[in-house]
Amino acid sequence: MEILGLTSFYPEAIAETDHAFYYRYNRISYVLEHGIGSIVARFLVNKGHKNGKEVHCITDKGLILIFNQESKRFITLLFARPAQIARYYDTVNLQPDKQTMYCAELNFYKKLNKM
């Protein structure tokens, strides 16, 4: 995974991929119940996928929402670990905010990334 930097991408699309709908239903349900938070940063990521680059949106609740850059379709949702979030920010020489990191620590402690 190559983090290319910050982007101004704004997630407008509601459409999701089959992966998001069938394999991440529990995660999505949890987030709908507990809230998604606000997007604090958006990173353009090249994973070498045939469908193109991805935009990884980090929220202040320690979530990473992943969208396809071209189709704008929602791909998946991750409960980020603190080290994951730090990796994104390290590529642009910035520090993540304390709220985001605190929530990522709670997500990790609750093992939400295993859901």
Image (tube, grey):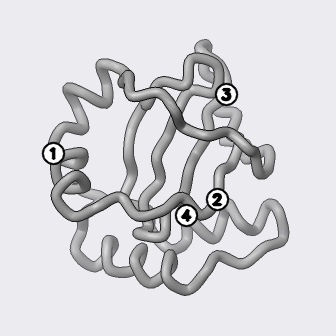
**Cα–Cα span, label 1 and label 3:** 25 Å
Residue 81 in the image, given as x and y percentages of width and height: 44, 68
Q: Are marks 2 and 3 in contact (CB under 8 Å)?
A: no
Q: Are marks 4 and 1 in contact (CB under 8 Å)?
A: no
Please state which of residues 15 and 3 is positioned toward the viewer in this rendering: 15
**Cα–Cα span, label 4 and label 2:** 13 Å
Q: First in sequence: mark 1 or mark 2?
A: 1
Q: Which residue is mark 2?
A: 41
Tell me the mark number nearer the camera, choosing from 1 and 2.
Answer: 2
Along the horizontal axis of the image, is 38 left or right of 93? left
Residue 98 in the image, given as x and y percentages of width and height: 55, 86
Mark 2 nearby-residue class (10 Å; few <14, some 14–19, many ≥20): some
Inspect the image, locate mark 3, and give the three-letter code of the amino acid beneath it: Lys
Please state which of residues 51 and 97 is positioned toward the viewer in this rendering: 97
Q: Which residue is mark 4?
A: 84
Q: Is residue 56 above or below residue 100?
A: above
Q: First in sequence: mark 2 or mark 3?
A: 2
Where does the N terminus fall, quadrant-wise?
top right
Q: Which residue is mark 3?
A: 53
Mark 3 nearby-residue class (10 Å; few <14, some 14–19, many ≥20): some
Tell me the mark number nearer the camera, choosing from 3 and 4.
Answer: 3
Badge 4 element:
helix
Along the horizontal axis of the image, is 106 left or right of 12? left
Badge 1 element:
helix
Mark 4 nearby-residue class (10 Å; few <14, some 14–19, many ≥20): some
Which residue is located at x 48 percent, y 70 percent?
Answer: 60
Q: Which residue is mark 1?
A: 26
Tell me the mark number nearer the camera, choosing from 2 and 3.
Answer: 2
Tell me the mark number nearer the camera, choosing from 4 and 1.
Answer: 1
Q: Is residue 24 above or below residue 17?
A: below
